[in-house]
Amino acid sequence: MKNRSPLTETERERAKVLRASGKTPTYIAKGMGRSPHTLRKFLDKPEVQKQVSIQREELASMFDHVAHRVVSSVTPEDVTKATLQQKMVSAGIAVDKAAALRGEIPVTVNVTVLLDAVQAIREMRQREDDARPQLTIPGNVQ
């Protein structure tokens, strides 16, 4: 059964942080054992929305800082190590998270479209190769 008492201060703060990080009111309510209506009613208050917006920008700045630190920490020695990939992936995730928190739309790539394009290029090259006359070297018959 859902808790019908008012949100506690701890629940209110937790709800604001979760909302700032991109969670939906329904998700937050479910995790707290509260009704979505209660959470929406709280999160829809203008002063709460302003606080959430400030927290969201703070989180975005933190992710920007993390991305900068990760990229700045790459040394020439890292280029030859497998952990470089991990650092670059981490930086990419941090940049995307910061953009998402700011409401910016990160560039997305549809891998299926790319794979289809690669396959089409391969097929085109194969057709071109098949259409070229084959050169034979006299005396080199197999």
Image (cartoon, grey):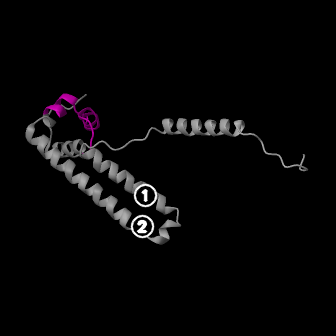
Look at the image and tell me whether residue 136 can be seen.
yes
- Location of residue 37 with respect to 86 vertically, above or below: above
> Which residue is at 12% across, 44% downward?
50
Discs 2, 1 touching: Cβ within 8 Å: yes
Side of 42 relative to 138 (left or right): left
- Location of residue 40 with respect to 81 vertically, above or below: above
> Which residue is at 22% across, 46% downward?
17
Whole-percent x, y for residue 52 in the image = 17, 44
Circle 2: residue type: Val
Report which residue position mark 2 lands on: 74
Region in magenta: 21-41
Mark 1 neighbour density, 10 Å: few (under 14) some (14–19) many (20 or more): some
> Which residue is at 44% across, 70% downward?
75
In what quadrant of the picture does the N terminus appear? top left
Mark 2 neighbour density, 10 Å: few (under 14) some (14–19) many (20 or more): some
Element at label 1: helix
Whole-percent x, y for residue 42 in the image = 13, 35
Report which residue position mark 1 lands on: 88
Instruction: Answer with mark 2 or mark 1, whichever residue precedes in sequence.
Output: 2
Judge whether residue 23 is colored magenta.
yes
Is most of the magenta stretch helix, strand or loop?
helix
Circle 1: residue type: Met
- Location of residue 83 with respect to 101 vertically, above or below: below
Element at label 2: loop
Whole-percent x, y for residue 6 in the image = 12, 35
Look at the image and tell me whether residue 6 can be seen.
no
Query: What is the quadrant of residue 115 in the picture?
Result: top right
Front-lying residue, 67 or 7: 67
Q: CA distance from mark 2 to mark 1?
A: 9 Å
Judge whether residue 54 is colored magenta.
no
